Image: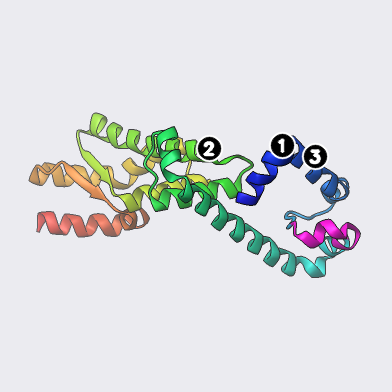
Amino acid sequence: MLLLKMLIEKIGARGIVSSIEKKLLPFENKLPSTEIKIFPVSKQVTKDYKKSLENIINPENSKSNQELFDKIFEEEFDSIKKYINLYREKFEKKHRFKLTDQKINSTAVYYCNYITDINTALEKIKFYNEIIKQAEFKFLNELDITIILEDNAINYIIDQFVMKKLKTDNLYIKLTDNFELGFKLIKEKTGKDRFFITESALKKPEIFLNRLIKKELG
């Protein structure tokens, strides 16, 4: 990241984009007409594009290409995490958002999975966090029951959003489907109206509720 920053300062972002486009133009012309879904770009790829293109297209190399792609992805992921950590206070001040280690991790995952920049990725994770807080408030406002999603539960939900395993519009519905009846039963029998939800509770709500009901109702 530091090297890239120095390069941008020297030749400008447009110059870098132009240089990359020239290097990858042969692949841009050829790969869209193939079944190739991943394109790991290494130093060797830019040195000998003809041989690299043949290797990528060859089905026998699919496993090695995937391994290289995963290696590059992991290196980029680690690099982004280190960069955000390096300027953590600056990003927290700019986005008015507390960056825990897990949220930095989620930001790096988002950055590596989508075509975006770090500030946009941070804003997305902040948005996801706000959606979760809105769901907690809605639970209280509509059901008169307070739920508090613990940090590990919040991180789990954010990761579900990032990987598109859960839509933001469906979070409240999922929470009510999983917990409303159980919490209402406990409230009716004991008067308790405040519940903490963990990551394990989100993953296995039935087991969580059965244990909680047994504990609260004896």
Q: Which numbered disc flags the more N-terminal residue, 3 or 1?
A: 1
Instruction: Look at the picture and state if 93 lies above or below 101.
Output: above
Question: On the picture, is 83 further left or further right than 21?
Answer: left
Crowding at mark 1 (Cα within 10 Å: few <14, some 14-19, many 20+) = few
- Residue occupying the point 71% across, 41% down: 10
Q: Are the residues tagged 2 and 1 within 8 Å (C-beta)?
A: no
Return the x and y of residue 46 as percentages of the image width and height: 82, 56
Q: Is residue 102 visible?
A: yes
Q: Nearer the viewer, residue 183 or 27?
A: 27
Residue type at numbered disc 2: Asn
The label shown at residue 18 is: 3
Instruction: Look at the picture and state if 105 lies above or below 171.
Output: below
Q: What type of secondary structure mainly makes up the magenta span?
A: helix
* Quadrant for the C terminus in the image: bottom left
Question: On the picture, is 150 further left or further right than 92?
Answer: left
Name which quarter of the figure residue 58 lies in. Answer: bottom right
Of tags 3 and 1, the one toward the viewer is 1
- Residue occupying the point 19% across, 42% down: 184
Residues shaded magenta: 41-53
Residue behind mark 1: 12
Under tag 3, what secondary structure? helix
Crowding at mark 3 (Cα within 10 Å: few <14, some 14-19, many 20+) = few
Q: Are the residues tagged 2 and 3 within 8 Å (C-beta)?
A: no
- Residue occupying the point 19% across, 33% down: 144
- Residue occupying the point 79% across, 68% down: 61
- CA gap between label 2 and label 3 equals 23 Å
Residue ranking furthest to the front: 10
